[in-house]
Structure formats: C-alpha cells, structure tokens
Image: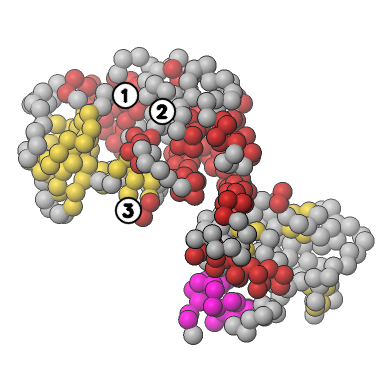
Amino acid sequence: MLESARKQIRVRQKLGKYRVLARISDGGFARVFKALDTIEGVHVALKVPHAHLVSKKTMGWFKQEARVNAALDHPNILPVKNAEIIDGHFVIAYPLGERSLAERLRSRMSTDRLFSYAEQMLEAVAHAHANGIVHCDLKPENFILFSGDRLRLGDFGVARLARRTVRGSGSGTLGFIAPEQAMGKTSPRADVFSLGLVLWNMLTGELPEWPFDWPPKGIERLRGKVHPDLLALLQRSMQIDPKKRFGDARQMLTAFRKILPRARRHLLKKRRQRNGSANTATIRDWKQVRFQHFERAFRKSLELDRVCGHCEGPVAETMSSCPWCAQELLFDADDTAYPEACPRCERGRKLDWRYCAWCYGKGFGDVSERSYPDRRYEDNCDKCDHPLMPFMRYCPGCRRKLNKKWRVEGSRSKCGKCGWGVVREYWEDCPWCGSRLSRE
C-alpha cells in the first residue's frame, strides 16, 4: 500500500497544485472530487482510487490504464489532464463537466437533443473500439455534459482495471451490462448491448431487465415517437446472442447515421401533425416557419425533398452541405427518388448515367444502353453532349468536371467563392461549396 494512502482526503485539503473543493461522487472504484488547479486557475475533477485498491502490484495497472485513456484523442472522450502520485494518493485529473447524463435525464429533453446525445455517445465508443479499447461500464453516469451540449465519455480503462481488481471478473454496472459480460466474457459487442440499453433508457425512461425479452417495457410509447428503423437498430443492439448484434460501435454508428435523417423526418412529420398546417398560427417555432416560407418559394426549383439530419432544414439531394447549419449532408440510398444510387455518395442516378453527377469516381458497371429523357435536363455537356440537370458537378456521360455556374430560379444572388446561385436572404452558407455567405 502506498504510504499515507489510507488517509482520507478532505475538503479544502491541498493535493499538490490542486485544492479540493467538494466531493462529487463515491463509487466502488474511486472517489471523485471537484478541485481548483491553483496554477492554471481552472476547476477540474480529481478521481482518486480507494486506498484498498492501491498497492505496488496494482500501480502498474493504474499507470497503464491512465496511458490508454490519455491516448484516446476524440472530442467526445473525456481527456486526462494529469495522472500522478500526490502525497501518497494516485490522482487522475480530468476537465470538470457541468453534470452527468444521468442527472440531465431527470428533466425533460427534446427528441432532437436525445438524437444528438446518442450520436455523440456512439462516436465516443466507436473511436475507442477503433483503437482496440472496450469500455466495459457504459452507463449514463459515465457520460459527462460540457457547455455547448458536448457529451464526453469518461472512465475509459478504469472499468477494465476494476474488472481485474474488484470482486469477480464480470464487473460493470448492474442493469447496463451484457449477459455474457456478467459471466466474465467481454468484447466490443458487450459495449454495443450496453449502448442499446442506455439509448432505450434515454428514449423511454425505462431500463430493460433480464431476461431482456423483446419488446421491453416502454415499447408502446416509443412506437409512436420514433421511426421503425430506429426501433430495429435498438432491437439488434440488445440481442441476447452477441453474434446477432452489431460487431462493434463503429458498425452501430454507421447504421445510426443512415437512419438519423429518416428519424428526423419522422419526428418533423409528427410535429406538423400536432401543430396543424403551415398556414395556421399554431406553429410557434420560428425556425420551422422560416423553413416553410423557404420551401413554398423554392421547393420546385431546388427539388427540396430531404431534410438536414442536424437542423431539420429543407435541403436537396444535389447539395453537399446544409445551407442552414453548414453540416455535411449524408444521404441514404434507400430514400433517393432516382431509380439507382451512387455507392459512394448515395445520391441518386439514372440508369443510363456512366458516372456520378455529384461525386468523382470510377464509372458504374451496370449502365443501360437505353437513353432516358427527363424534364429536369436543361443543358448539354460541351464535350460529349450528354444532357445535364441543374447543380450537376460532373458530366454523367464523360465524367468531365463542369464549369457551369448554376443559378437558383427565383434568386439573383450567387456565392462569392464558387459563383453558383444561392438564396442569400435565407441561407447562412453555400450548399455547393460550403463557404460562409456574406450579408451583402
């Protein structure tokens, strides 16, 4: 046992450059304190393992796990600021968040925000899995909220250490661990199961219990709230048989991102049904009113048949980024209005196109010899004479990059960078090149 590690840490005590201000939590592995870094002048969270877990034998484990945590560099993972022995205590310092996700879930939250948190959670765990790290203790208490609605996952590696040092090999938080993890078998699929439970808990307020029969409690509420594809994702992640789940959080994140635009459109449709038509005074969200005014004016000319998965603003399949929030637009091939979709960008294509009109890459293998007319064609390629639609980037006949400066019907504005047409009175950013639009 490290010398003086048996001594209790008290409020107002000084630990090196840190002054302890309050105790935040007390778990089976460690105590967490709020402290002031007297050198940097910022508040931090100090995690101090319980004295009975600290010995010469376990110190190597502590150091190794701290290195693993420090190596995970991602905006949704809680970084290690410092890890050292201070006055006989092993101390790990982290940035201090505002509160845990568990605390946030005690109050009402919009489904939009839940979707945002869900994506951030999946991104954090996917990054860990990509680096060969299994968390083993995913639960709302280990996701910490920071300003700007940033969610960060903490206790990386610490759960693995606890598995070695705390009673039994199947450690984790009861209620959030996979059945095989309770038997001592841990893998990325166990983290997938825990993520499914956390997401279910977030969306329904219920925590499924053993034997995890489908459907769990809360299904009635969820069926009327989210898209069926999101329900299917949750069902797959919570399968008892690990082989039937996603292989890891990276696969789960990819599936979630494909579903998210549909889930947001489903949510928007539900809202419109509750609020009535766009012409009624019951719509209170000024952003939605703005979106609806824009759609009425430009839906036909821009073919606004999609919504941004981030802000729910109306967008078109031809756009590269959202003109409302600047997020890169990712589309689902299943939703295209075209007969086929490009396997790279998942935007639509016609059967007689040899190349994608929206992204650059090799030609398509299954090209029809028949030519298909389309009312949207309004110009021809200068090189191969293939017909062109507005906002094409490349000729679908010869793959030549087009130099045309497409215009938006009904608007005289153009982007100062790419020269393509924009709707400056509505848009914040150019959807074709992503540059910020000035207010000239």
Question: Sequence order check: which comes first, mark 3 or mark 2?
Answer: 2
Judged from the image, the secondary structure of the residue bearing numbered disc 1 is helix
Tell me, yes or no, if residue 244 can be seen here: yes
Name which residue type carries label 3.
Ser
Identify the disc placed on residue 162: 1
Q: CA distance from mark 1 to mark 2?
A: 10 Å
The stretch of residues the image draws in magenta is: 414-439
Q: Identify the residue at horizontal 21%, vertical 36% (top origin).
A: 24
Which residue is disc 2 drawn over?
136
Position of 428 compared to 7: left or right?
right
Position of 366 compared to 394: left or right?
right
User: Residue 82: where, in percent of width, then height?
Assistant: 22, 43
Question: Sequence order check: which comes first, mark 1 or mark 2?
Answer: 2
Which residue is disc 3 drawn over?
147
Please tell me how crowded label 2 is: few (under 14), some (14-19), or many (20+) other residues with Cα within 10 Å: many
Q: Residue furthest front?
A: 281
Whether pointer 1 and pointer 2 mark residues with C-beta atoms closer than 8 Å, the reply is: yes
Q: Identify the residue at horizontal 14%, vertical 21% (top origin).
A: 1
Using the image as rendered, state which of residue 431 and residue 69 is in the foreground: 431
Judged from the image, the secondary structure of the residue bearing numbered disc 3 is helix
Q: Identify the residue at horizontal 15%, vertical 39% (top origin).
A: 22
User: Residue 85: where, in percent of width, then height?
Assistant: 15, 35
Identify the disc placed on residue 231: none
